[in-house]
Each structure stands twice: as C-alpha cells, then as structure tokens.
Amino acid sequence: MFHEVVEGGTVSRDAGAALDRDEVTSTALLAAFEALLSESVVEAGPERVADETGIDDASIEAVAAGDVGGLSVTDGAAIVGVTADRDAETIVAELRDHLLMGMATAVLDVDTIAAGIDADLTGQEVQQALEGRAEMTLEQLAEVMAVIERRKP
C-alpha cells in the first residue's frame, strides 16, 4: 500500500498528477501517505478504524486531519488495512520486500541510506527498521523511500 504511492518512478498526488523520479522527495511521499491514510479514515469512519485497529482516538483524529509523520508504519498499515481488507502484517511485509528490492536495484546499503536522510538514524538503525526489529515512523519511511526511489536506475 505505502510502496504503491510510487509507481514507475513517480509519486501519485492530486488527482493523478505525478512527480518525476528526480522530484521524489520525502515531503511528497509523506503527503501521499497522509492522503492515503486520511482517505482510509474517512471511508471507514473513525469509530470502525478505532475498533478494528485498537489505535487511540487522538491518533485517529490526527490522521484524519493529515498529521501522520509521527505515526508508526505498523499503525499506518493497520489503518489502511481496514479499508483494503488486508491485514497490517501483510502490508508491512510487502513494504519491506519493496524497500529491500529497491535497495538491491539501486545498489544501496543501509549506511548510504542513513547518510542520505535527515532522520537521526545510523545505518544499523535503518537496517533494524527495514528488518522489522525496530519501529519506523511514516516520516522516516518517507525519507528512506525517497533515497531509494531517486537512486533507482
């Protein structure tokens, strides 16, 4: 789901307009994540999202308002999963696969990614987040994904 906001080197935004690969930024990706999540909350309704995910009302209200940067990838996947009729674990697993395949295609290692993002993460912390041993926020995901997408051939 999150990886699907980037297709063919472009980021979907605003009624089908897209950014070219060179314009893929963490800001653009985070905006796409915000749209995806807020649409899910609107479509399902905050009550259903809270019931099915166990996420607190304040976080769901923030998501509906477009504030998702500090939300964990796992919680984001749970929210999207409500309207996609998919479980969060599958969404996160597909995202991790996409990121790792992107790293291989772009010939990137975790230290290079860590050096290319604003988030205060070491290469080891990036690796732990990509492997699911450490939690990653959607803002951090946007930064990591932007580096990977810009470096793909």
Image (cartoon, rainbow, N blue to C red):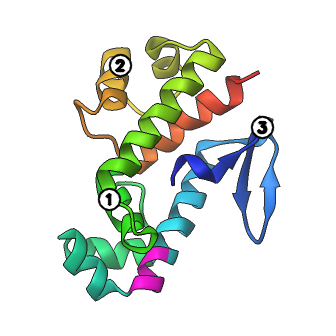
Check whether the beta carbons of the residues at disc 3 and disc 1 lie within 8 A of each other: no
- Nearer mark to the viewer, of 3 and 2: 3
Across and down, in percent, residue 150 comes to 70, 30
Taking the image as shown, residue 113 lies to the left or right of residue 46, namely: right
Image quarter for residue 54? Answer: bottom left
- Nearer mark to the viewer, of 1 and 2: 1
* Dominant SS in magenta: helix
Residue plotted at (29% across, 58% down): 75
Q: Earlier in the sequence, mark 3 or mark 1?
A: 3
The residue that disc 1 covers is 87
Q: Residues within 10 Å of mark 2 (few under 14, many from 20)?
A: some
Q: Earlier in the sequence, mark 1 or mark 2?
A: 1
Q: Can residue 25 be seen in the rendering of this structure?
A: yes
The residue that disc 3 covers is 21
Across and down, in percent, residue 132 comes to 28, 33
The residue that disc 2 covers is 122
Let me know if residue 103 is in the magenta part.
no
Q: Is residue 71 above or below residue 14?
A: above
Let me know if residue 41 is in the magenta part.
yes
- Nearer mark to the viewer, of 3 and 1: 1
Provide the residue span drawn in magenta.
Answer: 40-44
Across and down, in percent, residue 85 comes to 40, 69
Q: Can residue 72 be seen in the rendering of this structure?
A: no
Q: Earlier in the sequence, mark 3 or mark 2?
A: 3
Which amino acid, mark 2?
Answer: Thr
- In-front residue for pair 18/53: 53
Callout 3: SS: helix
Taking the image as shown, residue 1 lies to the left or right of residue 7, namely: left
